Amino acid sequence: MSIRVTVWNEYRHEKKNPKVAEIYPNGMHEAIASHLRKARDLDVRTATLDEKEHGLLESVVKATDVFVWWGHIAHDEVDDKVVERVHEAVLGGTGIVVLHSGHFSKIFKRLMGTSCNLKWREADEREILWVTRPGHPIVRHVDDHFILPREEMYGEYFDIPEPECTFLISSFAGGEVFRSGCTWTRGAGRIVYFRPGHETYPTYHDKNVLQVIENAVRWAAPTPPPKPHTFGNRKMGWTGG
Amino acid sequence: MSIRVTVWNEYRHEKKNPKVAEIYPNGMHEAIASHLRKARDLDVRTATLDEKEHGLLESVVKATDVFVWWGHIAHDEVDDKVVERVHEAVLGGTGIVVLHSGHFSKIFKRLMGTSCNLKWREADEREILWVTRPGHPIVRHVDDHFILPREEMYGEYFDIPEPECTFLISSFAGGEVFRSGCTWTRGAGRIVYFRPGHETYPTYHDKNVLQVIENAVRWAAPTPPPKPHTFGNRKMGWTGG
Amino acid sequence: MSIRVTVWNEYRHEKKNPKVAEIYPNGMHEAIASHLRKARDLDVRTATLDEKEHGLLESVVKATDVFVWWGHIAHDEVDDKVVERVHEAVLGGTGIVVLHSGHFSKIFKRLMGTSCNLKWREADEREILWVTRPGHPIVRHVDDHFILPREEMYGEYFDIPEPECTFLISSFAGGEVFRSGCTWTRGAGRIVYFRPGHETYPTYHDKNVLQVIENAVRWAAPTPPPKPHTFGNRKMGWTGG
Amino acid sequence: MSIRVTVWNEYRHEKKNPKVAEIYPNGMHEAIASHLRKARDLDVRTATLDEKEHGLLESVVKATDVFVWWGHIAHDEVDDKVVERVHEAVLGGTGIVVLHSGHFSKIFKRLMGTSCNLKWREADEREILWVTRPGHPIVRHVDDHFILPREEMYGEYFDIPEPECTFLISSFAGGEVFRSGCTWTRGAGRIVYFRPGHETYPTYHDKNVLQVIENAVRWAAPTPPPKPHTFGNRKMGWTGG
């Protein structure tokens, strides 16, 4: 049974900024999706902000096992109802892999309960990502570190709840560090945050970055069969014990 | 330097239900506050839903080190602006001790990012609370277990993020279990959930329950001095390193 | 590629106690192994204390992806060298599922760093196991609770490090509670503790218990390919960044 | 009531290496202890490897609330009985702050259950330590980062159990990162690992480093009164519930 992936992208920078369009002529979502489509166990679609209901109709959300989420300049334009829909899906078991500036998306802040704020700098600087949980499925086929020659800097303190697992920590040429790969569980849903991916760099063409996203999608996929947990009032003796 | 505590209570059941009024003639907040006032290191005030801005004016929130929070039938009447104010205070370091049906309060759900749902039953049944983290400051002066002869049942699954520490687990006469004492950190703020306290039982007159609340208040108090963390853009070289 | 499982059992009670022998004529290991053998993705062998090197020769340990471990009256007879061998394997990625009285085994205490002590009682009492992490692969196909009509009681405080995930909590007829399903990571290895299984009850014939063990084995299996992490001295510039 | 601190040091480098002796004429333990002695709430003594039972007689261990531990070239000379004594004390509530090369001490490995291995380099390089848990008592009075101009490099993967809290992450001039400030609980005892302190640098004269050690000692101190948890057999009905 394949994992149904929906790669969601804001898809605005690519339309406005020729520099970005040159790197990602079909949008960052297509760069990611076209990689994922090579995997036989993944069934991949894309959705973007300017589609109807941002491409996240109830039917799409229901048919999604894992979301990949990239947003930046238009977080506020994402409709609260759609955010609520995705939030409920995640609590019910749907996975979500939040990328880069998605740290400030409504859905990520909703799931974290914190400001998700951080330090940042655009200075074409070198990022080294270090594996801090070897053997974790999300770093499969990844060496003990990998390098992105030019990226935006994100620096600590990153205002997130203590991760259940921190699998990557970055250092930047400027000396900052950042928890670049983190996981959490909310309800039955698995959440991954993965840092790299500033729009002006070819990060989503990088072999290691694509490998981590692919691994993260598999790790975040729900355990079948979907079995909604029930809450509420219970009579004495209902347990059968 | 004393810890400034604001005990917040919905204060509705006590006004409407004679049974509750008999147990808590001045409201549950006063039962709790009057215990806390005996401690010389605590500076205690109360606030309730029907006061102006629910008694949580900006000046009050700023002058609070730790909130204690009880709500039940009127969670929806708590103004979103006030919730936002308390939420920001918590991320900045203010502690919060959420009690019993406060699990469904806007502020707790906002901090947790989950539904905070659970199973429940009102059947006058025995609850035993077991210490699962001996040596933790919140269970100071508490034995390895304590008993509440009659309480409402809350049962798992309790839809919360994996606690950073689970210090109490309850069993009920009906056979259910519940993670009754849990802690989390959000931003610089410490959060405690403590289960007991159904309005129709004299739970907030119980010696152990009051001891845990008192301990939890001290544990959740911010580390002085308040030092707001700064985020945002940084130039290369700013670190001085 | 199948998961290579070694079910290790002390195998002493079964030989000495006719009551136990009646329930487990071929030993508890065979009750468990014969269930696991039904799964096409599992390649199952057994090993017992009185075999040479307890059946855990270096060749066996190397050819094992996941251990299942049951011990009780003869923990001290397990050779320290064999414990060290299994410990190193776990840090390198081999999974281990520790059952019931295995809480006091040398290997579990070595991995936990604590006393692993607890309260206990043999009184033929009812245990209810409650799922506290729905959607987790280890509770796949398990309802929100299941019941063992007669088991030994284990009670908190259970002296273990705070689990990374607590997926089951038990209540007993006597009112005690216990964290019955817990996971940790040590090095690249995944560790599961699963409580039930006193030798005088037919627990390892129970459908739910066998399901959890089977799930736990799959969850604890290492992520291929095995890639030993390297430590030690590094020259400036080695990163390539 | 003051906190009784025992600063333990191997005290070998200082005797053999003139360079180290120049920086720490009375040993690293005295550099640390003389700082701690300025605090009125701390009652400080020292102990070193070559004293009788390494200065850790049972009477000393019993009279200690928090250990500070530095070792490097002589970990193996620490007697297993003394390690066992300290280990039991920690499970019973005594705190321990492990410094720098103490990562390879018997007591730290015993508490962690892992190899505690890492990458390293001596190259007089700059370390920046970043606060990743603002508001935590251990980083009180510390800015969002601080710099050590010359230190030994320690690099990930650091083979430790996922910390309960990571309060500092370092970057080094060579590009490596390291989880430099971590906490765990084992039994009733609180454990801190704090990275800096290579013997050939004046690290234990640094204001921020001393501040963190002082904070860590207070954080790791046991909650009074000491109340040993009891385990073992319990009769039905003993709970009183």
Image (cartoon, coloured by chain):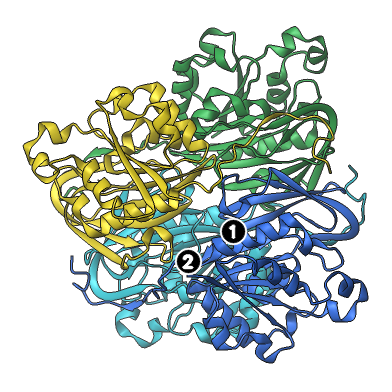
Chain colours: A green, B yellow, C cyan, D blue
C241 over B54 or under it: above or below: below
Q: Which residue, given by chain and number where applicable, does mark 1 sit on?
A: D183
Residue A42 appears in the picture as rendered: yes
Amino acid at pointer 1:
Thr
Question: Residue A129, percent across and down?
Answer: 77, 42
Q: Position of residue B146 (x, y in %)?
A: 25, 63
- In the rendered structure, the answer to whether residue B190 lies left or right of residue D182 reads left
Chain label for disc 1? D
Q: Is residue D11 above or below residue C217?
A: below
Camera-side mark, 1 or 2: 1
Q: Residue at x 91, y 51 (%)?
A: C238
Element at badge 1?
A: strand
Q: Which residue is mark 2?
A: C160
Q: Position of residue C71 (x, y in %)?
A: 46, 77
| Subunit bearing disc 2 | C
Choose top left, top right, bottom left or bottom right for residue B175.
Answer: bottom left
What residue sits 49% from the left and 14% below the top? A79
Side of C16 relative to C46 (left or right): left
In the rendered view, tell whether residue C157 sits above or below residue D80. Answer: above
Residue at (87, 67) in percent of width and height: D200
Where C83 falls versus D144 (above or below)? below
The 10 Å Cα crowd at callout 2, few under 14, some 14 to 19, many 20 or more, is many
Q: Are marks 1 and 2 in contact (CB under 8 Å)?
A: no
